[in-house]
Amino acid sequence: MFTGIVQDLVSVQEIVDEGDLIRLVLDMGAMTEALQLGASVAVNGTCLTVTRVDQGRAYFDVITESLRTTNLDGLSIGDLVNVERSYHVGDEIGGHIISGHVTSTAPLTNRTVKGHDHVLRFELEPRWLKYVFHKGFIGLDGASITVSSLHRAENWFEVSLIPETLSRTTLGQLEVGDLVNIEVDGQTVTTVETVERVLAERDLASETQELAVRGS
């Protein structure tokens, strides 16, 4: 599990295509201290398992499913990625709990600069946008960000970023058309799906009762 607070921007050193997976090598430097094999690391918000550590470099195997559902498939050598090591019990959670299981990807459709305020707009499929709410949390490339605006009819949401966030994450490098990994808030998903199920069950019960009355 992760907190959505990006610890560092690190560069992609190697990408080895093994056919049914790619081997991703990141220059994590001091972040590899005490990093054990099998540990989880969020790379652009995607939970990956450490397969090797060597002189500040961390190695990860990325399978086809992860490549298909995230933006890791578009990485090139030299690109920067957001990295966060998994948190320990007792650590401060400055963002919100993120699982590292990417929900979807979303393209940046517009960027507006208003002084120090950078507003980024992303297009998101309706089936995922229903879990996004004004002032709620969302994971963007592993960064915990507050939603500043959304328009369900037009399938977009916006976030407003301060210079610190722009400089410390990949979000400051995005250009229109670029994809970000999206993770919607798990608690929000549970709440929405519970309400939908309860309402559906209530409607079914009402319909059943009405049919019984008609048949009596």
Image (spheres, rainbow, N blue to C red):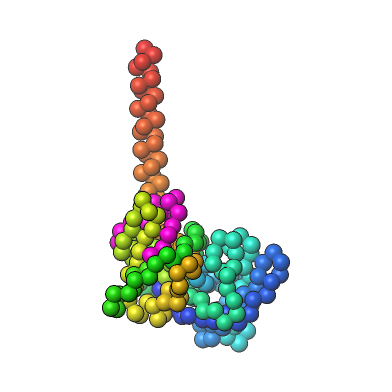
Answer yes or no: is residue 135 visible.
yes
**Residue 22 point in image, percent of width and height:** 65, 70
195 magenta-colored: no
Q: Nearer the viewer, residue 105 or 155?
A: 155
**Residue 207 point in image, percent of width and height:** 37, 26
Q: Quadrant of the C terminus?
A: top left
Above or below 14: residue 72: above
Residue shown at the point (37%, 39%) measured from the top left: 198
Above or below 19: residue 202: above
129 magenta-colored: yes
Above or below 210: residue 173: below
Judged from this view, the residue extending furthest toward the left is 115
Judged from this view, the residue extending furthest toward the top is 216
Above or below 4: residue 212: above
Residue shown at the point (34%, 55%) measured from the top left: 151
Q: Nearer the viewer, residue 197 or 12?
A: 12
Residue shown at the point (49%, 58%) measured from the top left: 103
Residue range (magenta): 121-135
Q: Nearer the viewer, residue 142 or 158?
A: 158
**Rendered image quadrant of residue 134:** bottom left
**Residue 129 point in image, percent of width and height:** 40, 54
**Rendered image quadrant of residue 155:** bottom left
Residue shown at the point (59%, 61%) measured from the top left: 68
Q: Nearer the viewer, residue 186 or 19?
A: 19
Answer yes or no: is residue 96 visible.
no
**Rendered image quadrant of residue 176:** bottom left
**Residue 126 point in image, percent of width and height:** 43, 51
Q: How many marks?
A: 0
